[in-house]
Image (cartoon, rainbow, N blue to C red):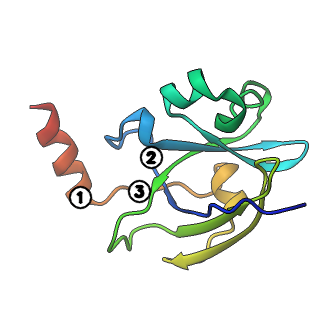
């Protein structure tokens, strides 16, 4: 399968972390393997095939990711190389502990937000 030109540098997040949905990716399992869906509402509306979320409703396992931030050390950061059919063919763990991507998607690994993230999130809600 041909690779897409775009690669993604992403990190898993916990649902309690304060990120806009438009910044999120969903990695989910399907009969084709791990797929990447882009949750940007405008992209879903304008280019649904590119967003690739139609298979999420049937997925048993889904994990949320965002673009990786500099200096992240409390979770693994992945560089993924999607194929043309939006499956994740190859990936690398570029920082953090090595955790297989499938373990994150299947929920075997959970992000534990740092205390700094908790403070930032609570400040935003004040």
Determine the secondary structure under disc 1. helix
Q: Which residue appears at 36% of the width and 70% of the height?
A: 72
Give the label, 3 or 2, closer to the camera: 2
Along the viewing direction, whichever of 3 and 24 lies nearer the viewer: 3
Q: Where is residue 90 drawn, in percent x and y? A: 76, 69
Q: Which mark is residue 112?
A: 3
Q: Which mark is residue 61?
A: none
The 10 Å Cα crowd at callout 3, few under 14, some 14 to 19, many 20 or more, is few
Where 120 falls versus 100 (above or below)? above
Q: Earlier in the sequence, mark 3 or mark 2?
A: 2
Where 60 falls versus 66 (above or below)? above
Determine the secondary structure under disc 3. loop
The 10 Å Cα crowd at callout 2, few under 14, some 14 to 19, many 20 or more, is some
Cα distance, mark 3 to mark 1? 9 Å
Circles 3 and 1: CB atoms closer than 8 Å: no
Q: Which residue appears at 65% of the width and 75% of the height?
A: 92
Residue named by callout 1: 115
Cα distance, mark 3 to mark 2? 7 Å
Task: Name the quarter where the C terminus is drawn.
Answer: top left
Q: Earlier in the sequence, mark 1 or mark 2?
A: 2
Q: Where is residue 33 drawn, in percent x and y? A: 84, 51
Query: Does residue 53 appear left or right of residue 10 in this picture?
Result: right
Determine the secondary structure under disc 2. loop
Query: Does residue 82 appear left or right of residue 70 in this picture?
Result: right
Q: Which residue appears at 43% of the width and 42% of the height?
A: 23
Circles 3 and 2: CB atoms closer than 8 Å: yes
Query: Does residue 12 appear left or right of residue 59 in this picture?
Result: left
Q: Which mark is residue 14?
A: 2
């Amino acid at each position: 399968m041909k690779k897409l030109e775009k690669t993604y540098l992403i990190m898993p997040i916990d649902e309690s972390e304060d990120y806009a949905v438009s910044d999120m990716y969903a990695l989910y399992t399907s009969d084709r393997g791990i797929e990447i869906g882009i949750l940007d509402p405008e992209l879903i509306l304008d280019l649904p095939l590119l967003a690739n979320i139609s298979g999420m409703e049937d997925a048993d396992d889904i994990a949320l990711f965002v673009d990786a931030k500099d200096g992240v050390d409390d979770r693994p950061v992945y560089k993924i190389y999607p194929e043309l059919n939006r499956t994740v063919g190859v990936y690398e763990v570029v920082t953090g502990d090595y955790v297989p991507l499938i373990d994150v998607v299947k929920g075997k690994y959970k992000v534990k937000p740092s205390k700094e993230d908790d403070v930032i999130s609570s400040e935003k809600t004040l």
